[in-house]
Image: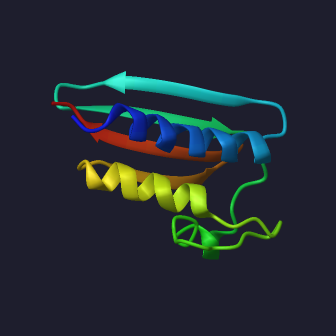
């Protein structure tokens, strides 16, 4: 369900982010359920400041390094347009982005 090319762009945007902030490792996992697929992309970077975690998907949000968040804003628009969701959360050892995407 959706547009494969746009979905690839959404995943690439998160992976680009992970490459920028990871110290040594990025982990990608996917689990297929009956009605959806869950994809988690985790990097072992320093994390996102808690007061900014809800802002990173906004267009033109600027992080502490001065980079603008166009990629994550585009990702959120693509995923939500096709009925999915994308979230970010600080974990003990980095940041995880989770996409829940409905299956046709």
Is 100 left, or right, of 16 in this rendering?
left
- Image spot of residue 76 (x, y percent): 43, 57
Q: Residue at x 80, y 70 (%)?
A: 64
Q: Is residue 32 left or right of residue 86?
A: left
Q: Residue at position x 63%, y 70% from top? A: 50
Q: Is residue 15 above or below residue 78?
A: above
Number of on-image labels: 0
Image quadrant in which you'd find residue 100: top left
Picture colour scheme: rainbow
> At 55% across and 72% down in the image, what residue appears?
55
- Residue 17 pos. (x, y %): 68, 47
Asked where in the image residue 87 lies, by quadrant, the reply is bottom left
Would you say 6 lies left or right of 84 here? right
Q: Quadrant of the N terminus?
A: top left
Image quarter where the C terminus lies is top left
Nearest the viewer among 54 and 57 is 57
Q: Name the residue at 56% across, 36% down.
A: 41
Instruction: Establish if 61 lies above or below 8.
Output: below
Along the viewing direction, whichever of 56 and 48 lies nearer the viewer: 56
Give the percent coordinates (x, y) of residue 24.
Answer: 83, 32
């Amino acid at each position: 369900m959706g547009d494969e090319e746009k979905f690839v762009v959404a995943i690439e945007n998160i992976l680009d982010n992970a490459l920028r902030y990871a110290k040594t490792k990025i982990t990608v996992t996917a689990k297929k359920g009956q009605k959806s697929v869950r994809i988690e992309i985790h990097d072992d970077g320093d994390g996102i400041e808690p007061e900014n975690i809800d802002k990173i998907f906004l267009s033109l949000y600027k992080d502490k390094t001065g980079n603008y968040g166009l990629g994550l804003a585009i990702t959120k628009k693509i995923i939500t347009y096709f009925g999915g969701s994308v979230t970010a959360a600080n974990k003990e050892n980095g940041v995880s982005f989770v996409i829940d995407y409905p299956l046709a």
